[in-house]
Image (tube, coloured by chain):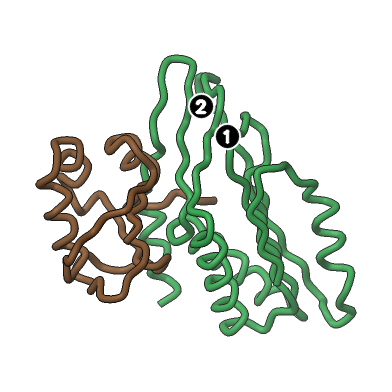
Amino acid sequence: MDVLYFAWVRERIGLPKERIDTSAATVTALVDELRAREERYAAAFADLSALRVAVDQELVDFDAPLAGAREVAFFPPMTGG
Amino acid sequence: MRIVVQEAGFDAGQELTRFSAADPGIGAIVSFTGVVRDTAEGTLDVMQIEHYPGMTEAALTKIAQEAMTRWALGDILVIHRFGRLAPGDQIMMVATTSAHRKDAFEAAEYLMDYLKSRAPFWKKEILRDGAHWVAARDEDEDALGRWD
């Protein structure tokens, strides 16, 4: 699936988008996989309360299932307006 | 409904004239225009606005559709910019029309409250002496509670 990062999450991880092969069943499981990869991921995902997640462009909770998901995006709380 | 996400600037006056011209049944037009505010010390060089193409348009449409079901509105206009903006630049505008002002005012406030916390935009302030991402404010999140 495609994993996207925005704002400081993008800066901390160092790229806006990557393709990840995963069998993670939930967003939390995907986060655990990413954290285990490298320090920059562990740093970006250190505090999930500071992050929001969207699956296929819909805001969801971190325990949301990933079955059939094409795109997951991680970002800080939004600051529009 | 007209939802626009663009890098270019816009003329709020022209947009409002065009938006409100079509419907003779309306008795009220409410609009809000957001402007890039400088810091108290005048040190803001650039306000950089990032967004999530695709989700942004979908989220704004969903918010506007919800407003259309909650209030008796004629129409909704939302324009939001992204990219590099300077102090004083217009960032975004929302406008609503209705037969009476209460619906138009309330719907415009609803749109603003949701747009601040549920549309995927992020602001970064590039200051003369550094840069930082603007943090979401608790009161913006709390503001959504009044629409439950």
> Where is the N terminus of chain A found, in terms of image quarters?
bottom left
At 32% across and 35% down in the image, what residue appears? A14
Q: Position of residue B56 (x, y in %)?
A: 52, 59
- Taking the image as shown, residue B122 lies to the left or right of residue B14, namely left
Name the chain letter of the residue that bears numbered label 2: B
Q: CA distance from mark 2 to mark 1?
A: 7 Å
Q: In terms of depth relative to the viewer, which is nearer, A23 or B126? A: A23
User: Would you place residue B141 above or below residue B63 in this image?
Assistant: above
Q: Are marks 2 and 1 in contact (CB under 8 Å)?
A: yes
Place residue B24 in its image quadrant. Answer: bottom right
Splitting the image into 4 quarters, where does residue A3 fall?
A: bottom left
- Chain shown green: that is B
| A33 horizontally vs B122: left or right | left
Q: Which residue is mark 2?
A: B39
Q: Residue placed at 81% from the left, 58% from the top?
A: B16
Nearer to me, A52 or B66 = A52
Q: Which mark identifies residue B37?
A: 1
Chain ID, brown in image: A
**Between B18 and B57, which is closer to the camera in this rendering?**
B57
Q: Secondary structure at mark 1?
A: loop
Q: Is residue A22 left or right of residue B38?
A: left
Q: For residue A36, which numbered disc appears in the image? A: none
Q: Picture coordinates of residue A23 (x, y %)?
A: 17, 66
